[in-house]
Image: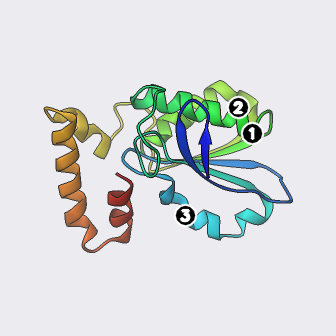
Amino acid sequence: MAIEIDDNVYLRSARSTANQLDIWFIHGFGESGLSFQEAFASRLTRQYNLFAPDFPGFGASPPGRAGKGLNGSFRVLRSLIDTLSKNRKIAIVAHSMGGILGTWLSRDLGPRVITYINVEGNLTNSDTSFSARVDREASAEAAHRKLLSLLWQRGRTSTAYQRYSLSL
């Protein structure tokens, strides 16, 4: 499902008739909502509303107008949550760089966030792995090429890295 908020953002979603809670999945740098595809095939969909956006420029979402980087992704995510979850309680599941966004959301949304799960996540800008490699390269294109090469090598034996490559 594509949602027009501030940007044309591709959003994976599943709505439950039980409608107990909204769970927002936040992908890491170079990833997409595909990182969480197993959740959409699980029993979670019976009780909870699930949402997994592809941030602008990642996965199925084209580059957006909200700005690049963490701040732009945060604005898009906050707008999606304000629109789709309104005043509902939410849970956040974040991976890698998405951990920074999850931390910011938890701060901004306060008691609306009843659970925050940071999976292999970055808590601050200095706590990074793949995303830190981008800053070491001379240009965004060079960083992209280097990251794709690394993922291609690792993707020969790992479906997780294959999915990462597709999202990037």
Q: CA distance from mark 3 to mark 2?
A: 23 Å
Instruction: Inspect this view and state whether residue 62 appears.
Output: yes
Q: CA distance from mark 1 to mark 2?
A: 6 Å
Residue identifier under label 3: 37
Could you say which is closer to the camera, residue 76 or residue 124? 76
Residue, x 22% and y 36% (percent of image)? Answer: 140
Residue, x 54% and y 42% (percent of image)? Answer: 9
The percent position of residue 32, horizontal first and vertical second, equals 46, 52
Residue type of the residue flagged with mark 2: Asp
Labels 1 and 2 touching (C-beta < 8 A):
yes
Residue identifier under label 2: 82
Residue type of the residue flagged with mark 3: Gln
Residue identifier under label 1: 85
The percent position of residue 3, horizontal first and vertical second, equals 62, 43
As helix, strand or loop, the secondary structure at mark 3 comes to helix
The percent position of residue 165, horizontal first and vertical second, equals 32, 58
Which of the 4 quarters of the picture holds residue 37? bottom right
154 versus 143 height, above or below: below
